[in-house]
Amino acid sequence: MSTITLNGTSQAVSEDTTLVDLVAQAAGRPIGSDGHALDGSRLGMAVAVDAVVVPRSRWHRTPVVAGQTIEIITAVQGG
Amino acid sequence: MTIASHPDPLLVDGVEFSSRLIMGTGGLSSLHTLEQALLASGTELTTVALRRYAPGQGDTLFSLLERNGIRILPNTAGCYTARDALLTAELGREALETDWVKLEVIADEDTLLPDVVELLDATEQLVARGFKVFAYTSDDPAVARRLEDYGAAAVMPLGSPIGTGLGILNPHNIELIASRAGVPVVLDAGIGTASEAAFAMELGCDAVLLASAVTRAQNPVAMATAMRHAVAAGRLAAGAGRIPARRHAVASSPMDGLIDADTPASVPRGDWAPTGGAR
């Protein structure tokens, strides 16, 4: 297991976890290798690893490494 | 509902909008009321903030906007440096699949005024990265011009500080910015009520962006409706060629044929022919 910080909370993940797994878990729906939801709806989510944005096309081949700070963000109400 | 009798779309970055009211989405706890207010406003473009995803939210703002076909303009609210704003803008582009960004770089949390030094820096960098920058700025005409020079897609001067509802504190500057700009000018922040939104349009702004005036009103849906009409009315008035302001009265009724107490009763009142006198 690897320990990461996901959205400010410490979390243990298995060694073979990739970003697409984290996003699918958060969104509660399966996500394809192109980074889009398999149900055809738009996700409206983005991922930053150690303050660098990872494009959705690379989520499935970006392994999660112990010690990383990962943020999953979405649109919220705001001016 | 059509208010203007002729098409008069707002054109930004090659995209046409029939509504000139851009809405913010902050300030309402009920997503249902927000949806009703957005629909009442007639807006076709709304701003959102970007924050950590919280699972199990049920209906989300994103799906609400998608469902209603309202285009999303992600903002960089809460950023104090160009560096922070760049990361937030990149997240917005990735999450919402748009190059458009409402760039906010704030100087301090008491005033929420734009830090124009960081703003100019961030604008230059974002434009270089292919973003279409909607720059929230002060009401300084020199800064507005510089933002345009740096490639901003729209310049968005404040009327007064965010959330204050103080209206337009420096109409002269707003008019000057609008008259010199080659890109759309959007009055952003400070609007409190409908007359101020109309005033912004009369000053020559291309659009108005507001949130709190609607979302924190006692009746958001009614205020959203008012804003919709105010922006349309202000736009029409701005193009209608208003009369010059004068120091003294100019009668709008003719003086010729005026009945006074000595006039014989054989001339009935209201029966005279138009004389071409004073209007």
Image (spheres, rainbow, N blue to C red):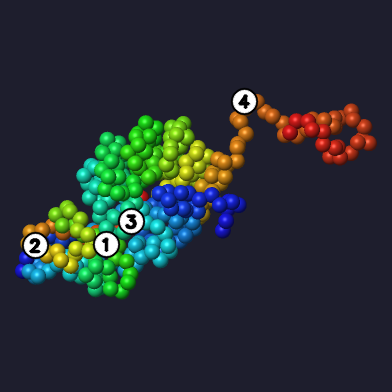
Q: Is there one chain holding both mark 3 and mark 2?
A: no
Instruction: Name the kind of residue labelled 1 in the image.
Output: Met
Marks 4 and 1: which is nearer the front? 1
The image quarter in which residue B82 lies? top left
What whole-number distance in Å separates the C-alpha atoms at marks 1 and 3? 12 Å
Residue lying at 14% horizontally and 54% vertically, measured from the top left: A50
Determine whether the residue tagged by mark 2 lies in a helix, strand or loop: loop
Residue B202 on image: x %, y %: 52, 39
Report the disc number at residue A45.
1
Instruction: Name the kind of residue labelled 4 in the image.
Output: Arg
Q: Is there one chain holding both mark 4 and mark 1?
A: no
Determine whether the residue tagged by mark 1 lies in a helix, strand or loop: strand
Q: Which of the two labelled residues, at mark 1 and mark 2, occupies the earlier sequence position?
A: 1
Labels 1 and 3 touching (C-beta < 8 A): no
- Crowding around mark 2 (Cα neighbors within 10 Å: few <14, some 14 to 19, many 20+) is some
Quarter holding the C terminus of chain B is top right
Give the residue at mark 4.
Answer: B247
- Crowding around mark 3 (Cα neighbors within 10 Å: few <14, some 14 to 19, many 20+) is some
What whole-number distance in Å separates the C-alpha atoms at marks 1 and 2? 21 Å
Marks 3 and 2: which is nearer the front? 3
Between B239 and B107, the one nearer to me in the picture = B239
